[in-house]
Image: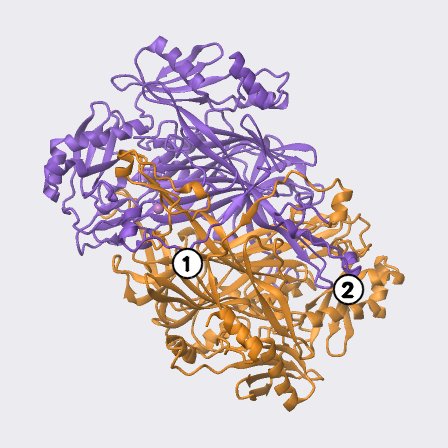
Chain colours: A purple, B orange
Amino acid sequence: MTDRLKQLAFQVGGTSPAPHPFDPLTTTEIDTAVSIVRKEHGPLNFNAVTLWEPRKEEMMAWLADPERAPRPLRAADVVAIAPGGKVYDGVVDLKAQKIVEWKHTPNVQPLITMEDLQEVEHVVRKDPKVIEQCGILGIPKEEMHKVYCDPWTIGYDERFGSGVRLQQALMYYRPHVDDSQYTYPLDFCPIFNAETKQIIHIDIPNVRRPISRAPPNNYHPASVEAEGGFRTDIKPIHITQPDGVSFNINGRTIDWQNWGIHVGFNYREGIVLNNITFNDKGVVRPVFYRLSLAEMVVPYGNPEHPHQRKHAFDLGEYGGGYMTNSLSLGCDCKGAIHYMDAAFVNRAGASTVVKNAICIHEEDAGILFKHTDFRDESVIVTRGRKLIISHIFTAANYEYCVYWIFHQDGTIQLDIKLTGILNTYAMNPGEDTHGWGTEVYPGVNAHNHQHLFCMRIDANVDGPNNTVFQVDAVRGEGAVGSPENPYGNAFYAKKTKFTTPRQAMSDYDGSTSRTWDIANTNKLNEYSKRPVSYKLVSREVPPLLPKEGSLVWKRAGFARHAVHVTKYSDDQIHPAGRHVPQTSGEPSVGIPQWIEQAGETCSIDNTDIVLWHTFGLTHFPAPEDYPIMPAEPMTVLLRPRHFFKRNPVLDVPPSYARTPSQVAAGKDVCACKKNDGSSVLV
Amino acid sequence: MTDRLKQLAFQVGGTSPAPHPFDPLTTTEIDTAVSIVRKEHGPLNFNAVTLWEPRKEEMMAWLADPERAPRPLRAADVVAIAPGGKVYDGVVDLKAQKIVEWKHTPNVQPLITMEDLQEVEHVVRKDPKVIEQCGILGIPKEEMHKVYCDPWTIGYDERFGSGVRLQQALMYYRPHVDDSQYTYPLDFCPIFNAETKQIIHIDIPNVRRPISRAPPNNYHPASVEAEGGFRTDIKPIHITQPDGVSFNINGRTIDWQNWGIHVGFNYREGIVLNNITFNDKGVVRPVFYRLSLAEMVVPYGNPEHPHQRKHAFDLGEYGGGYMTNSLSLGCDCKGAIHYMDAAFVNRAGASTVVKNAICIHEEDAGILFKHTDFRDESVIVTRGRKLIISHIFTAANYEYCVYWIFHQDGTIQLDIKLTGILNTYAMNPGEDTHGWGTEVYPGVNAHNHQHLFCMRIDANVDGPNNTVFQVDAVRGEGAVGSPENPYGNAFYAKKTKFTTPRQAMSDYDGSTSRTWDIANTNKLNEYSKRPVSYKLVSREVPPLLPKEGSLVWKRAGFARHAVHVTKYSDDQIHPAGRHVPQTSGEPSVGIPQWIEQAGETCSIDNTDIVLWHTFGLTHFPAPEDYPIMPAEPMTVLLRPRHFFKRNPVLDVPPSYARTPSQVAAGKDVCACKKNDGSSVLV
Ligand SMILES: [Co+2]
Ligand SMILES: [Co+2]
């Protein structure tokens, strides 16, 4: 029965085909989970209802033999907040229709949902003390509807601790509803109690900064038209796939150019890729069990109070899935697109859907390989293709575009584009930024900041037992002129095996072009006799600039090193902890805690391991980034090394090829007439 | 008169419009120069006849006022070798039709041309000592037609010095003419005298390595067909521009999306971009006077003799222009393409042309910027476009694809893709590579190597007087808890001004995400009050791994540091010297020499400067790279920072935009129906 038939059968007969164990919960499953919890625990606000991921051991058994192995438990992972603020974590068995785990978790704050964010502005506008502060800055109380705020979790403020659920309101003003508010930041910061819906405190700076009187700085079409209009010299580029896409999708499993990939999605990490395999001439070889962007932190570098609180953990504190954009053909993506929706729970416990949350499409990838023999101009040139699985999320002012890119040659590339709008703060005319920020427009101070992402790499390179090596390009021993290095040109790849999580805490070293190999030491490449491996190649790897012992350093323990390696554990998904808002960092939760707990004797040699890679960039704003920022890209690569016996893309049809004997015979075998990269030789 | 008409007029009337002073020499000009030289100096072999570039002072005056300023001298730069080997450097005034400079240059060797390369193999096959060596390895003399060699310049060999023009022949064997020879490297290395056309020496290793008996490892279509055939699951992607391209070309000057770029080309650097300007709302602002890839070196890391000689300077020793590929629509490039040819001289003094040497085309560049307001889903999303000026050259086994990419936002990106075939050496079964190489196939040792490129950046950021700053992302002063850094989160961009060439010799520092600003300190950004600048962002910056004092270190002085800055001089174009083959490095020519000569007192502060940037990668081969290597890309960015007052691409028509007031009014203003990124709002 084809997939389409199965679906029709379901629609007609009313029985659903069992979801793949990695599939996100359906709206039906979310509704089921909520109703089971409600029945037992009464009124609750739901924070998250998401797939309780299958335990790896069960799942590996099922993947190995889906016909006979028992199906892993299908369950919902639930976070709920009771009236009064008590936080509950639970697991609901969706088959047995019962709660299998339910516990009150004290002193934590689950992430802030879009609904949580949306309510702050209304409260802020009506608060008398906020109105008073606006008045001081020059905003009359009749204009309070022109006052806006971006509510952030408070992060952590030692004055208020973790017990009360708080948000900080970054304040702005819009002369007109369509004006960009980031041109008019206000200098004070109300603190919102999410339980009582009240402003409980306002942080007011010593130096006041009246509202800017600079003209608006907008990017919307009417303002562009008013300033001279749009450019008219861009001719269209059409990208079409008349025969459709080159991939097949079965449920959420994609089959493309030897890759097999299950595409999941959750409220937190957004896209989750599972069970990534590569069909190597008929042998389906596992590569990664699970890949995701698991956490991030955006520390700002202005030391003045209360800017230290600006260090958003956009995934753990807000959810990259919850903030995801609905994508539309021709706007966010081009060509033949396959979309997937995303299902969530809302506060009231109803399931909701973001249409077109995930975009899946192909792109031409330019030259895949080429060589010309200089003797006779015998030549081969072959074009590549790539598969891109993407989503975009809006974190208040910023946009993060996340592209998981699969290449035909076995390379996996994670690209992130930063766009959107700078976070801004008020400054007075002539005020010194002291180098902590940039005046990107009169009265607008954009603070220095970093965007640090944590990629979770649950490796499965030819099997679950893997080992990580740090690889440094270093000079050979021996002085110039010595017998072992007579001409001084010796260099090699120095490999350091990581045997314990403590030893594996490692930083980037640009001076050795440092990379990390995820190797399966049980399998050697037949030719090179080196372990089959995937190499992490990442060059945008700034250190965490907040100092050791600082608030950010304590809270964002995952960002202290470019690479951490841990032994796999089902419960270790979130690098900064399961509940991130208002963690103090004392003790630091997530990765540092796991490593501490694992102890000196924990072995990560030839076992099931997870590599956590923190990368990103340090952003010193400039006027070019304002009022909206041209996208800035970053790239991380996972490259097969000693994994294949030879170049795995030799069977991609070349655009053009002729051999020496064909040249000698005067044959022209150009096959590029179709101009589509997929032509067969003539 | 339009350009087309001008050209017709020329074709009909026989009078040529005066070439732009930056234009490469035409075939007619090359022929003219040769005939003038011949008349005076008799029989010569021509090594290069190329544009003698206009002196900058004259050229700047002409660019400022082309109608009234005198036209810079149009001249040919000539390198010729007289019978007997004497090398002559000369300059021919093409207007006055006379030689203005002619000198014998002792003890240098001009680069090796394709013709020089082609003749070695024939000599090698007939040399009795080579035949003898082949016999020792198991190749009978009847099979000498199956013996091949890649001739390289000797680089430098202390036994032979610089006086005699020499090549080393890297030896291979092909069982069948269509087999890849790199699977059958031979272990000895003949030395060829280019003057006498004789093998003057053979380097023979102590340990002999008989010819491999492994089966061929090929990538040509017949071999793919024999191994199971081509994959058939790639559906076509069509990329079309029905209304043509968005750029105009006047002669060789391109006008695209506010950019103005003159596209030159020479035998050595390949593409040369001159007079790069950006039209900033009607004001044409200079950005770069000249950009090129000026030199490169590929040192190999095996310390055993004679592998130290493998460190090709592909541009200075062979010429990236001479080795350039003729590109074909649909094979090397896709979409609407504009090509330019390249004209050279051959040894006999005749002009030659490589058709379609340069490819100029546009590509969709994905999301240019996007922002969604989380309150109401008011949104803007705009797609970007890029212009790509590319060429590809074949350096014996390797291919280098060079892409100069212009972005609408003022960013210039240099991408280089490496593909082609690994240089290989023979190894015996079970032989230890000692970590200096990888057995990529039985009997095939691919040695470790680096690809280091030197980008010449002749800056003109809002005028010729520029200053370079090293920029490091560093932590603020003060311990965590101190009054100046209470929360320990302070960080800033530390800028170090380079005032002398000696001080400016600087290395990459990944731990500070080091960048370099090319600034015009005479012009401050109106908003940020910082100098207008272009920032060099480069993350693939390995150090030169051959040790200080080594042969490569001495010869490739430019590669000792990631950045050198020199005061502009008309004669300083070639980082490793004008004539690179057989330089000893004693003294080191090119950049180190210029810096030495400039002395301690030379100022590079607020003057006409050139920044030389060496970047690249260290390549430890793996079986995936063989028998032909999937393209591996590298990127360098030049980004405007504080150069524009605001985001310069706001007037690019969005794909989709709706403002808060439009959302409130329920208006749907999607403009993405055309799916081409250029739609106008509806
Ligand atoms: Co940023
Ligand atoms: Co290489």
Image vertical order of residue A597 relative to residue B33, above or below: above
SS at circle 2: loop
* Mark toward the viewer: 1 or 2: 1
What amino acid is found at the position of numbered circle 1 in the picture?
Gln
Question: Relative to A90, does residue A167 appear above or below in the rendering?
Answer: below
Q: Position of residue B521 (x, y in %)?
A: 31, 67
- Return the residue nearer the eye: A413 or A263: A263
Residue at horizontal 57%, vertical 23%? Answer: A4
**Pointer 1: what residue?**
B257
Q: Is residue A527 left or right of residue B564?
A: right
Task: Identify the residue at image location x=57%, y=46%.
Answer: B238
Q: Is residue A152 visible?
A: no
| SS under mark 1 | loop
Q: Residue A382 — which label?
A: none
Q: CA distance from mark 1 to mark 2?
A: 58 Å
How far across and down, in percent of the image, does residue B613 sit? 47, 63
Query: Is residue B201 depicted above or below A427 in this figure?
Result: below
Q: Residue at the spot x=77%, y=74% of the render?
A: B200
Q: Is mark 1 within 8 Å of ligand 1?
A: no
The residue carrying mark 2 is: B204
Question: Residue at left 11%, top 37%?
Answer: A142
Image-quadrant location for residue B682: top left
